[in-house]
């Protein structure tokens, strides 16, 4: 009561001067902004345009938007602002949008903003807001959008929140709320978006009124400790598009009418709970589309409603629960479905033939269930499938000959089923990385055509009834795992499959013979001859390889010459972000190969050049594909040049003409990590290696996560890690896709990645670059630091790339110790093993298993913090990490 009175008085006192100064209203609004600014700390001087001198022009100030010469919106997100959010801002009578997200405001929820009568959107996401949500939150009754996510708001959500009846968006995710969610949610009849996720201290059931929110499209309650049953009223959320209830402690049955009238459903994630019973089998069932195609005419063009069901569903995730009963079969044939995850339940049922209609399907993970059918012939028709993981089920019958026909198929795991018959010839799945058919009843020979799958790396055929010889063609593969134990194989084991691989992966085949096995082959001369042969082959291969490089180099030289000639004519434009005295002729001269500091691949080279002042800068030449206009190009380089992080090399400026772009980076005296590691007598203390690893991880994490816009590096390798005098690393050559354009970038990387072991295996089939590809490349750099081996220089007789070289060894017991750089004292062993584990996680074949660079940074940091533990010999903890493959 008292508060309302004060409010009224306050408003009156404001209204009064407004009438008097109506004619000079404009400057009044400007004054209000200056008053608001006065209580704000602005270390980066982002509000420099807000000044007395431009008062009449306040509509043009940073973040300000006016409409009809009255200010309606203030957007000050991501400016490092702190200080006090002053109530004076409410003197702006028409202010309806206020976004202060992503700043450093450190205070309780600014209740006084409820005096802003027109305010509809309040966004305080990602600040340091603390304290509880007061009962007076009800005063914000005009709000339509309230975003308090990612703060430190604690305590219970008060019942009074129920009077915010106009709310369309409520985001309280990522806070420290506790207690139970009040039963007032039924009042939010306009709500479209609700996020209470990531509140680990909530202990609550899901209020059953939630079913009244018929406009709700997204409900995100993951990782917030919700328990109890999912209310049956959930089935009434007819507008639902995205449902995420994962990682809670929900139990009991899932509402059996769920999905029946949800035509817009796009994503269902209820994974990692304790849900049980059968999943509503009618979900997405409708009439089968096969029937539709036969009967459309009979329906006279009109499609029966039930067919509309779930037509938009893309993701269905119910893994890690306790569901039983038949898996809803309608899901398998949805037009838009991309992801089906149901592993670790007790589902029964089958994959129907109609799966061929799921033409967008990319991933199936149904391991550890009780599926019983055959593997349908039609699965091979799904051309987008890249992962099919169905281990630990009761699939039976023969493996259809086309089951690997998807051109992007990368991971197949059918281990521990009841499959019989022969392994079919697999020729079409050129992207297959991992094939596990272990623990089945397969018979016949190992098809020699497996040797034609160029990236096959993990092959597990153990515990079957395979016979015949191991085909020599498998020597073509760079296998990291080759497990054929416990079959009935016989004959000579091809030499390269014995060397370096654990002998245990051949055991249980008493008729195999070869060096190192218990049986020697009859006539050992033969052995040496075939060994010699394989040497010859590899010599031939390297010869062909070298010839290829020469051809490419000649090609580049020619192109480069013609560029050089042309570019002498083209006009140059230069933009410097730092005071530099540099002219284009310096640049042209610098292209002289003599002073290249690091060879940068097809995308260009890095050269050190000396300025007239004596200063050194590094210059990288890129071919200008011409896809970006000069203006856009400038904007893009500026995006990269604005990055300020101690582990990211600064861009000092750039020059370009129609043919070339020269990026000018700061020069670092120690050159690149890659050059150091490549030296034959490479020596570096462990603590320095950790410093480099941590620094690189921080730099990447910064561009991935903290810098706006988020960037991807896309070409990390040790040659792109430069070191300053104190061995502080700086990553360089980042995000060049933005400068040369996506197409030019991917095609130049494609020509390079054939040689590069820094590239994540999914690069071949994935449509989109991800941060997890950077994580992979980082993992390779970390392996270089741990092993002291360069990833790019391979020893002639051991042409495995570094990742495979390491994986082969760590799979042998005690092998982990043997990959560590022997030049480092054993007192660092514990930390090195820790770093090795991280590197193996980062280089997991499966992108989702790789940690984010932020997590990597934290894990590296905590390694050096706990280094005082006594060394623990062996690698017994390895399996605790969930990402060994
Ligand atoms: C607004 O500011 C920009 C620079 O920030 C300036 O180019 C433009 O002329 C200004 N517009 C007005 C109307 O003052
Ligand atoms: C606020 O906006 C309304 C129309 O939306 C307009 O009539 C009114 O004049 C504006 N108020 C001020 C102070 O400009
Ligand atoms: C915000 O502060 C951080 C750390 O001080 C700094 O790195 C960053 O550049 C600042 N961002 C802006 C937009 O000023
Ligand atoms: C609030 O601002 C943040 C940061 O820009 C943005 O990500 C978020 O979507 C905004 N919230 C709403 C509800 O628009
Ligand atoms: C919810 O709405 C009802 C009726 O519209 C109202 O009586 C009740 O007070 C509201 N609840 C809260 C907590 O404001
Ligand atoms: C989850 O809920 C069950 C009861 O359904 C309870 O026994 C268990 O302690 C809960 N687990 C957690 C982690 O809260
Ligand atoms: C298989 O699923 C069951 C639940 O149905 C679970 O208890 C078990 O741990 C799972 N096994 C593995 C290896 O994950
Ligand atoms: C295949 O599945 C089995 C059983 O679930 C698992 O142990 C194995 O690690 C999987 N293999 C790969 C390569 O993912
Ligand atoms: C394995 O194959 C042999 C013949 O090749 C057959 O005699 C034997 O019964 C098979 N074993 C099993 C377990 O299928």
Image (tube, rainbow, N blue to C red):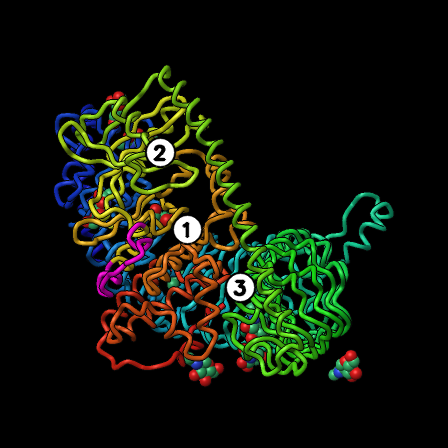
Dot 3 crowding, Cα within 10 Å, few <14, some 14–19, many 20+: some
| Residue 55 numbered tag | none
| Residue 269 numbered tag | 3
| Residue 636 numbered tag | 2
Image coordinates of residue 831 in percent, x first then y, are 28, 72
Q: Which residue is mark 1?
A: 166
Say if the magenta span includes residue 687: yes
Name the quadrant where ligand 2 sits.
top left
Q: Describe the element under mark 2 as helix, strand or loop.
A: helix
Image coordinates of residue 340 in percent, x first then y, are 61, 62
Vertical placement of residue 537 versus 575, above or below: below
Residue nearest the viewer, comparing 209 with 467: 467
Name the image quarter holding residue 164: bottom left
Name the image quarter holding residue 414: bottom right
Residue at (19% x, 57% y) in the render: 107
Residue 769 visible in image: yes
Please provide the residue range marked out in magenta: 675-691
- Ranked by sequence position, the earlier of labels 1 and 2 is 1
**Left or right: 694 with respect to 565?**
left
Between circles 1 and 3, the one closer to the viewer is 3
Residue nearest the viewer, comparing 127 with 68: 127
The residues bearing labels 1 and 2 have C-alpha atoms spaced at a distance of 41 Å
Residue at (26% x, 31% y) in the render: 653
Residue nearest the viewer, comparing 540 with 426: 540
Mark 2 CB lies closer than 8 A to ligand 3: no
Residue 8 visible in image: no
Dot 2 crowding, Cα within 10 Å, few <14, some 14–19, many 20+: some
């Amino acid at each position: 009561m008292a508060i309302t009175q004060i409010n009224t008085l306050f408003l009156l006192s404001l209204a009064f001067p407004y009438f008097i100064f109506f004619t000079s209203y404009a400057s009044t609004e400007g004054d209000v902004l200056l008053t608001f600014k006065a209580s704000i700390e602005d270390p980066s001087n982002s509000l420099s345009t807000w000044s007395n001198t431009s008062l009449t022009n306040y509509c043009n100030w940073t973040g300000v938007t006016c409409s009809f010469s009255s200010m309606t919106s203030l957007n000050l997100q991501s400016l490092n602002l702190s200080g006090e959010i002053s109530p004076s801002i409410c003197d702006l009578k028409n202010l309806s949008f206020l976004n202060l997200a992503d700043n450093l405001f450190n205070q309780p929820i600014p209740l006084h903003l409820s005096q802003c009568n027109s305010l509809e959107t309040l966004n305080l996401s990602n600040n340091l807001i603390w304290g509880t949500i007061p009962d007076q939150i009800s005063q914000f009754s005009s709000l339509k959008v309230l975003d308090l996510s990612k703060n430190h708001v604690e305590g219970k959500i008060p019942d009074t929140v129920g009077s915010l009846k106009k709310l369309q968006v409520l985001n309280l995710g990522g806070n420290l709320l506790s207690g139970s969610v009040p039963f007032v949610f039924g009042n939010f009849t306009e709500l479209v978006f609700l996020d209470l996720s990531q509140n680990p201290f909530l202990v609550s059931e899901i209020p059953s009124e939630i079913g009244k929110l018929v406009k709700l499209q997204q409900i995100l309650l993951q990782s917030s400790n919700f328990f109890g049953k999912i209310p049956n009223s959930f089935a009434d959320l007819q507008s639902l598009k995205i449902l995420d209830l994962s990682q809670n402690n929900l139990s009991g049955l899932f509402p059996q009418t769920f999905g029946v009238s949800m035509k817009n459903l796009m994503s269902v994630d209820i994974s990692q709970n304790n849900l049980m019973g059968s999943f509503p089998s009618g979900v997405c069932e409708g009439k089968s589309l096969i029937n539709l195609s036969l009967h459309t005419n009979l329906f006279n063009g009109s499609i029966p409603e039930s067919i509309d069901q779930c037509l938009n569903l893309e993701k269905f995730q119910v893994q890690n629960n306790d569901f039983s009963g038949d898996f809803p079969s309608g899901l398998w044939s949805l037009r838009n479905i991309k992801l089906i995850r149901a592993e670790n339940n007790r589902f029964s049922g089958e994959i129907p033939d109609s799966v061929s209609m799921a033409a967008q399907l990319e991933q199936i993970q149904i391991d550890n269930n009780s599926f019983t059918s055959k593997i349908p012939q039609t699965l091979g028709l799904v051309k987008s499938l890249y992962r099919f993981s169905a281990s630990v089920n009761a699939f039976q019958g023969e493996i259809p000959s086309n089951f690997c026909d998807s051109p992007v198929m990368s991971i197949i795991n059918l281990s521990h089923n009841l499959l019989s018959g022969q392994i079919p010839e697999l020729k079409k799945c050129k992207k297959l990385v991992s094939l596990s058919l272990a623990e089945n009843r397969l018979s016949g020979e190992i098809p020699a055509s497996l040797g034609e799958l160029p990236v096959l790396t993990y092959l597990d055929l153990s515990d079957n009834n395979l016979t015949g010889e191991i085909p020599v063609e498998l020597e073509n593969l760079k296998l990291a795992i080759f497990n054929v134990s416990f079959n009935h194989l016989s004959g000579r084991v091809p030499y390269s499959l014995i060397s370096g691989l654990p002998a245990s992966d051949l055991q249980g085949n008493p008729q195999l013979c070869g060096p190192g096995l218990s049986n020697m082959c009859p006539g050992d001369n033969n052995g040496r001859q075939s060994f010699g042969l394989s040497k010859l082959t590899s010599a031939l291969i390297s010869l062909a390889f070298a010839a290829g490089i020469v051809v490419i180099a000649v090609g580049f030289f020619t192109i480069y010459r013609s560029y050089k000639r042309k570019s002498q004519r083209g006009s140059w434009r230069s933009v410097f972000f730092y005071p530099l005295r540099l002219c284009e002729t310096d640049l042209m001269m610098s292209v002289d190969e003599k002073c290249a500091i690091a060879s940068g691949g097809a995308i260009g080279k890095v050269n050190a050049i000396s300025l007239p002042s004596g200063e050194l800068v590094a210059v990288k030449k890129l071919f200008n594909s011409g896809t970006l206009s000069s203006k856009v190009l400038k904007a893009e380089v500026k995006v990269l040049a604005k990055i300020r992080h101690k582990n990211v090399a600064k861009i000092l400026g750039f020059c370009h003409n129609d043919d070339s772009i020269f990026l000018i980076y700061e020069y670092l005296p120690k050159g690149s990590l890659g050059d150091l590691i490549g030296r034959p007598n490479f020596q570096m203390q462990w603590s320095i290696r950790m410093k480099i690893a941590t620094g690189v991880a921080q730099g990447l994490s910064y561009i991935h996560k903290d810098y706006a816009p988020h960037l991807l590096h896309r070409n990390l390798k040790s040659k792109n890690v430069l070191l300053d005098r104190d061995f502080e690393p700086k990553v360089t050559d980042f995000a060049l896709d933005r400068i040369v354009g996506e197409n030019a970038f991917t095609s130049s990387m494609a020509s390079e990645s054939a040689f590069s072991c820094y590239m994540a295996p999914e690069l071949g089939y994935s449509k989109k670059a991800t941060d997890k590809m950077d994580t992979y490349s980082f993992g390779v750099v970390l392996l270089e630091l741990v092993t002291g081996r360069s990833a790019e220089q391979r020893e002639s007789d051991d042409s495995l790339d570094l990742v495979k070289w390491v994986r082969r060894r760590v799979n042998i017991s005690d092998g982990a110790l043997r990959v560590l750089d022997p030049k480092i004292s054993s007192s660092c062993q514990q930390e090195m093993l820790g770093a090795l584990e991280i590197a193996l996680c980062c280089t997991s074949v499966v992108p989702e298993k790789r940690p984010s660079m932020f997590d990597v940074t934290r894990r590296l940091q905590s390694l050096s913090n706990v280094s005082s533990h006594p060394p623990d010999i062996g690698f017994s903890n390895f399996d605790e990490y969930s990402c060994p493959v």
